[in-house]
Image (tube, rainbow, N blue to C red):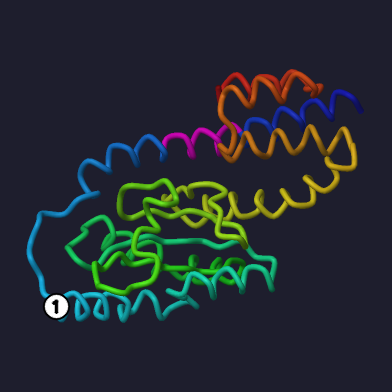
Amino acid sequence: MRANAGVASRARCAQAAVLATAIMKFSRLAVCLAALCAVAPAQVKSQEQLVAMREEKLSKTVFGRAEWTADFAAAKNQAAETGKPILAYFTRSYAQCGPCDAIESGLLSSPEFVEFAKSVVLFVHCTSHVEGDANPHLLREKGFVSYPTLCFMDADGNVTVRAPQRDVAGLAAVASRLGELEQLRELAGEGDEDAIRRLLLCEVELGMLTRAQILERRKNVELDEAEGALMVIVQ
């Protein structure tokens, strides 16, 4: 029985390492893309033109395939009511964005994504440079600099983890782990040692902790060999 448990633990940790590594790779890629996509060439456009560009962007077919909202407050309210995480998509309309067009015509338009979307609250934030738009600097306020950006948020609008953009399976894996967090946090708060261990592993897998936080947290958690190896890989 102990041998079987060890095999299962190593398998879980191997899967967790793949997920954690994917998240870290996308974080590094985001930094590289920032230099290419963060700032568009300066062109003076009238407010009338900017409004028209914003409306054209948000009326694209992709945003009608699933239930998207551009209202941040409404997205947070829906997340609070349903218990679902928010999947936020940051794009822009004031200038051309090739990477945005690619993800909109690919991943976000796929039947698999439309099905997955039922398990989350979809929020699209479009930076438009239109005067009076709500939350015009939300991308930077959430710690991001480039378009497109996908991330998961909680019902308070706090970023929980940046989302892998490769495929629906990657998004679903992150969403599934996020679904476990609240329950684990509640149990860990009650002193459940197994929940404390699983919470640490979950947060590490999702890239939610810094190296210093990992080192501090693991001092009080007993890990098996495979779980300890995951900590080394992520650090």
Q: How many marks?
A: 1
Q: Residues within 10 Å of mark 1 (few under 14, many from 20)?
A: few
Horizontally, residue 180 falls left or right of residue 212, namely right
Please, what is the dominant secondary structure of the magenta stretch? helix
- Please tell me which residue lies in front, 126 or 11: 126
Q: Residue at x 78, y 21 (%)?
A: 224
Q: Residue at x 14, y 78 (%)?
A: 49
**84 shown above or below 9:** below
Residue 122 belongs to magenta span: no
Q: Residue at x 48, y 38 (%)?
A: 22
Q: Quadrant of residue 207?
A: top right
**Helix, strand or loop under label 1:** helix
Residue 222 on image: x %, y %: 81, 22
Q: Residue at x 37, y 60 (%)?
A: 90
Residue 107 on image: x %, y %: 39, 61
Residue 65 on image: x %, y %: 43, 78
In this picture, which residue range is highlighted in magenta? 17-25
**158 shown above or below 81:** above
Quarter that holds the N terminus: top right
* Kind of residue sitting beneath label 1: Gln
Quarter that holds the C terminus: top right
Residue 22 belongs to magenta span: yes
Horizontally, residue 172 falls left or right of residue 165, namely right
Q: Residue furthest front?
A: 132
- Please tell me which residue lies in front, 129 or 75: 129
The residue that disc 1 covers is: 49
